[in-house]
Image (cartoon, grey):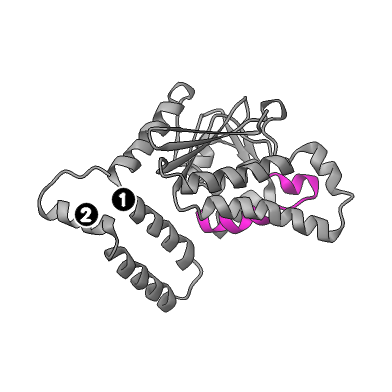
């Protein structure tokens, strides 16, 4: 049985965690398949938006317990290679050329919360819980910290990362981790409609360039950030989508992407 399922419907690429008996814990195999599947969705011409979801009660419970036991026997070099393995997944999702939406039907803890963090949008059911709990077992939320500080700011990130506090979905929304809290019966349809709005209303090239801009300008000095923004702006004006969009706007034509 594959630990990741990939399917396409109405230009949405669904990437589904499929280790329900292990609460979709992050094994080496699962991380590898997720990297491969996101790479597949990125170049799939039938996919414009990607949804990351999961089978079972939990979205993702973090690292696999059996795998955590193995880590105790690793050398520094082996641990570094393993850390880079997870880093590659987080970076792949964060920098994917297509918009990624997390559909969270259950708890997302530790590395699982990290998965939700690196997505562009995240929708969760009210009963889902979230937390970066690594400090409670003598570990550190090293990789996700880089993305979380970008997402919600240093002070809010500092509180979550240093306390290891587990919070409910509404509090996660209040702190900037979630896009929306949705009742369980409406979660799938809400994510679908949100994805379809992006698909039909927005240029794929524009969303891709905007993601690149957000990713690249964050840590640059003001002048360098503006220089990069101007360069990306100039590139965007030459795209076919821009020409098509401006033509439709000037001619008062309805535009569906």
Q: Which mark is residue 203?
A: 1
Q: Nearer the viewer, mark 1 or mark 2?
A: 2
Q: Position of residue 129 (x, y in %)?
A: 60, 34
Query: Is there CB contact under 8 Å for labels 1 and 2?
Result: yes
In this rendering, position of residue 123 left or right of residue 130: left
Question: Of all residues shown, which one is farthest toward the top?
Answer: 185
Q: Position of residue 119 (x, y in %)?
A: 51, 46
Q: Which mark is residue 244?
A: 2
- The magenta-colored residue range is 132-151
Residue 141 visible in the picture:
no
In this rendering, position of residue 125 left or right of residue 48: right
Q: Count the labels in the image.
A: 2
- Dividing the picture into quadrants, the one containing residue 143 is bottom right
- Dividing the picture into quadrants, the one containing residue 244 is bottom left
Going 56% across and 53% down the picture, which residue do you hit? 92
Q: Position of residue 142 (x, y in %)?
A: 69, 56
Q: Residues within 10 Å of mark 1 (few under 14, many from 20)?
A: some
Going 80% across and 41% down the picture, which residue do you hit? 67
* Label located before the other in sequence (1 or 2): 1
Tell me which secondary structure the magenta stretch mostly adopts.
helix
Give the camera-side residue of 158 and 137.
137
Q: Secondary structure at mark 1?
A: loop
User: 237 above or below 173?
Assistant: below
Residue 207 colored in magenta in the image: no
Give the camera-side residue of 115 and 250.
250
Q: Position of residue 18 (x, y in %)?
A: 63, 30
Residue 139 colored in magenta in the image: yes
């Amino acid at each position: 049985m594959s630990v990741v399922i990939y399917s396409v419907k109405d230009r949405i690429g669904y990437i589904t965690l499929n280790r329900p008996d292990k609460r979709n814990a992050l094994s080496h195999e699962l991380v590898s398949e997720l990297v491969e599947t996101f790479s597949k969705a990125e170049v799939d011409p039938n996919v414009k938006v990607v949804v990351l979801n999961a089978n079972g009660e939990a979205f993702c419970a973090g690292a696999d317990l059996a795998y955590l036991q193995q880590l105790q026997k690793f050398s520094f070099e082996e641990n570094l290679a393993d850390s880079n393995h997870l880093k590659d997944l987080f970076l792949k999702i964060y920098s994917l050329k297509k918009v990624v939406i997390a559909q969270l039907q259950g708890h997302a803890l530790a590395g699982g919360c990290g998965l939700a963090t690196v997505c562009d949008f995240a929708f969760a059911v009210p009963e889902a819980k979230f937390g970066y709990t690594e400090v409670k077992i003598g570990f550190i939320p090293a990789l996700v910290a880089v993305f979380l500080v970008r997402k919600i700011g240093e002070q809010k990130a500092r509180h979550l990362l240093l306390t290891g506090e587990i919070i409910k979905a509404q509090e996660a929304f209040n702190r900037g981790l979630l896009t929306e809290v949705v009742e369980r019966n409406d979660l799938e349809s809400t994510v679908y409609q949100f994805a379809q709005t992006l698909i039909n209303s927005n240029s794929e090239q524009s969303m891709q360039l905007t993601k690149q801009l957000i990713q690249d300008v964050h840590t640059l000095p003001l002048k360098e950030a503006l220089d990069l923004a101007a360069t990306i702006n100039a590139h965007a004006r030459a795209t076919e989508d821009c020409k098509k969009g401006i033509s439709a706007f000037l001619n008062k034509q309805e535009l569906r992407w």
